[in-house]
Image (tube, rainbow, N blue to C red):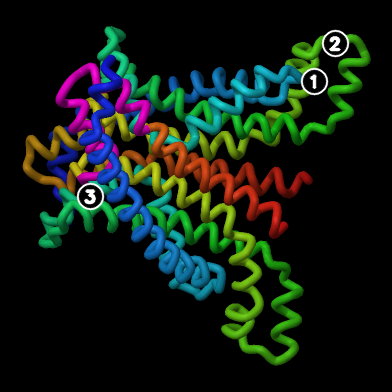
Amino acid sequence: MDFIGAYAPAHLKFLLEGFAVTLKVAFISILFSFAIGIVIGVLRYSRIPFVSHILAIGVETIRNLPLLLIIFFTYFALPEIGFKLDKFYAAILALVIFESAMLSEIVRSGLNSIEKGQIEAARSSGLTYTQTLWHIVLPQALRRMVPPIVGQFISLLKDTSLAVVIALPELMNHAQIINGRNVNYVIPIFLLVAIMYFIVNYSLSLISRRLEHKHL
Amino acid sequence: MLNYSILIEHWDMYTQGFANTLKASVLALIGSLAIGTVMAVFRIAPIRPLNWIGAAYVEFIRNIPLILIVFVFFVGLPAIGIRFDSFTAGTLGLTVYTAAFIAEVIRAGILSVPKGQMEAARSSGLTYLQAMWYIILPQAIKIVIPPMGNQFINLVKNSSVLGVIAGLDLMYFGDLISSETFVTFDVYIFVAIFYLLLTIPLSLGVGALERRLARSR
């Protein structure tokens, strides 16, 4: 094991560059997934015939597939039907597809946790269904959803590492490149990479725990 | 339409991959149940250093990516002379990772059993471990089964990381078939169907159990 060689400044810089890509991909993905997840969650909650059935099938299918398979699909299979994406966008598309399905379930159970009496009260005081949803149900549900959404973001940050299979230049990929130079670097580099993921994700989980205590 | 001749011609590879995916998932489930139970008991046992070990294991492992743990077994340990074949390395990685989540599930289950039960058992002369094994754990199991089912579904999906290290699972054979046939779209659709054959019945089962448990409360 060569800790000094492994932690050379050039390697540290290279790992940080990889981590920046990890964070960027995760952040862009969570933004899109959150928006799509809310739309799907609300549509399923509203029980619009046909639409909510189709969405239910879609969401359940995606949730029951490995993310790795979806990444292979967006990067290797989509070009076959004339839809070519570079690594960066293929990774983001796969993460958005997978995470939207996960987040829509969080949104749906958040909405379901709001007591039915609130909806009845709002409707009987003259609000339309959409107004009730937007002004009464959604704001309360969103607060309850914050801890599971942070949890999902932690999963997303970890899952970004799966894009190593399509050689997206994120943290795992950069770690593997350094490891390829000298076998004595492998353990020190894995240790450092683990600590990098841990620091960010553990901080997020502490924030999530604090929010949980504040809102309930 | 899908090219079914690919499925028929490579049936043996698909089923072998499917069998290995199932095998890795079941082995990792058994291993992570064992480690997870130990870690959960460590976290709540009235012995400080054990609490720290349990908490450190769960918090560290839960916050790092699975693929990193698999790489440690497949690339990291061989660097210091400990070698595994790819299937074993992948299954060990899955076990270590899943154990952290299962420990949390079991801990929540144990904590849901009223404190008085432990006190009553202890005051009737049982040791801490006896009380845990005969009184607390059997009651915790009922509450723990649905979330445990969810962990198994995650395990089946996560076992696809074996494909990254040539671990002979469904993902690996999918990759192999697509490089033999130069077809990717149809090959991966069939891989997806094989995964769904495992995960959809599990999801439905877990959903039914959850509803039943909600009613019985």
Between the residue at mark 1 and the residue at mark 3, the CA separation in whole angstroms equals: 49 Å
**Where is residue A28, by image quadrant?**
bottom left
Q: Which span of residues is magenta-colored? A: A168-193
The residue at which mark 3 appears reads as: A73
The chief SS type of the magenta part is: helix
Residue B213 visible here = yes
Residue named by callout 1: B135
Cα separation between marks 1 and 2: 10 Å
Q: Is residue B5 above or below residue A80?
A: above
The residue shown at (66%, 48%) is: B211
Q: Residue at x 31, y 9 (%)?
A: B82
Residue B137, quarter of picture: top right
**Label at residue B126:** 2
* Location of residue A117 with respect to A125 vertically, above or below: above
Q: Can you tell which of label 1 and label 2 is closer to the viewer? A: 2
In the rendered structure, are the residues bearing label 1 and label 2 in contact, judged by CB atoms less than 8 Å apart?
Answer: yes
Q: Could you tell me residue A160's position as x and y percent?
A: 33, 46
